[in-house]
Image: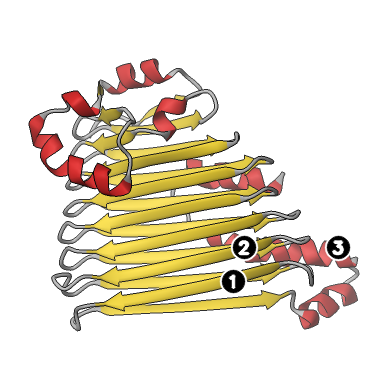
Amino acid sequence: MSKNKTLKNIGPDKIISQLKAKIYRLNNIPPAIALYLRPILAKEKILDQPMIVIPPNTVATINFNQKENKIWGAATIISGSGSQLTLIQRQNQTGAAASLIVANPGAKIDYAVITKTEQETIIKKVAVVQAQAIMTWYPVALATKNYSALIKSEVIGQGSQCKIIGLLKAAGQSQSTISLEHRHFGKQTVGDIFFRAIGNDQAQATVNGLIKIELKAKQTNSYLTENALLLTDQCSIKADPHLEILNNDVKASHSATVATLDEQAMAYLASRGLKPKEAEQLLVEAFYQAVINKITVPAITTAVKHVYEN
């Protein structure tokens, strides 16, 4: 395995050069890739983006700002077998960012999409997870305007794993819709969706979660957890989890909660000398800390904490 390359705040051409990656368009991709990729791109309506093919066994951390480096946030990225990639995308401009990730056999990909913008934003991220690969999405957003995100993994390879670990703080009069999906096709696959949302002011949000286990996906384990915390009487968050199971030889479950600040905890903190705003902040921090505790990549932990603690 090669040494980890950390690529931060440099141009897209330089990133591609340092990774020794190749870039294609749909009309000139190699036939072996086109055979399985074209139907997926057509299905997801991701047809006009460039395709970046990363060599096998590449180890790299790619840290980029979508405003300045649009190619990486709106590309089809095909990881080489055995690669270990960390991608941290900062989405701080209005508009849409759609992309497809292919985790080839044995690859491990951690992809954080951190959105902090006062403009309407649409995010669409889709992964195809091959045998023994591990794909983890980290969608994190501070939304004061309308925000929409679809994060989906097609788990097709035997023994592959997929996770979504995410966080939303919705404020102002924003309207947000988050859709989180794991679709299991391969045998002995593992999935975990863990998402928390915080509502403030007059914000409205819906968090849709779906686990679908197809007929051939025997011995799959997949779990879905959605938790929401409301800070005002005027905000609203709907947690809407779903299971679709077509095979009996699996384990799957879902849970969802929507709650307000714990009055007993607030009273206890007041008895310890904390002002109401200080107590509220402490409880909110504890709520989102559960998400941060699940992040296993230090660079992503740092990026997420920087957004929420500032």
- Identify the element where label 2 is drawn: strand
Q: Amino acid at mark 3?
A: Lys
Placement of the N terminus among the 4 image quadrants: top left
Q: Residue at x 32, y 31 (%)?
A: 48
Q: How busy is the neighbourhood of tag 3: few (under 14 within 10 Å), some, or many (20 plus)?
A: few
Q: Quadrant of residue 218?
A: bottom left
Q: Is residue 1 above or below residue 274?
A: above
Is residue 302 something one can see in this rendering? no
**Circle 3 residue:** 277
**Relative image position of residue 143 (x, y in whole percent):** 65, 50
Q: Is residue 32 above or below residue 143?
A: above
Cα distance between the residues tagged 3 and 1? 25 Å
Q: Is residue 26 above or below residue 137?
A: above
Tell us which disc is closer to us: 3 or 2: 2
First in residue order: circle 3 vs circle 1: 1
- Identify the element where label 1 is drawn: strand
**Relative image position of residue 112 (x, y in whole percent):** 47, 45
**Circle 2 residue:** 205
**Circle 1 residue:** 238
Q: Are marks 1 and 2 in contact (CB under 8 Å)?
A: yes
Q: Amino acid at mark 1?
A: Lys
Placement of the C terminus among the 4 image quadrants: top right
Cα distance between the residues tagged 1 and 2? 6 Å
Tell me, for residue 252, which label it has, or none. none
Q: Residue at x 12, y 28 (%)?
A: 30
Q: Nearer the viewer, residue 174 or 195?
A: 174
- Identify the element where label 3 is drawn: helix
Q: Are marks 3 and 1 in contact (CB under 8 Å)?
A: no
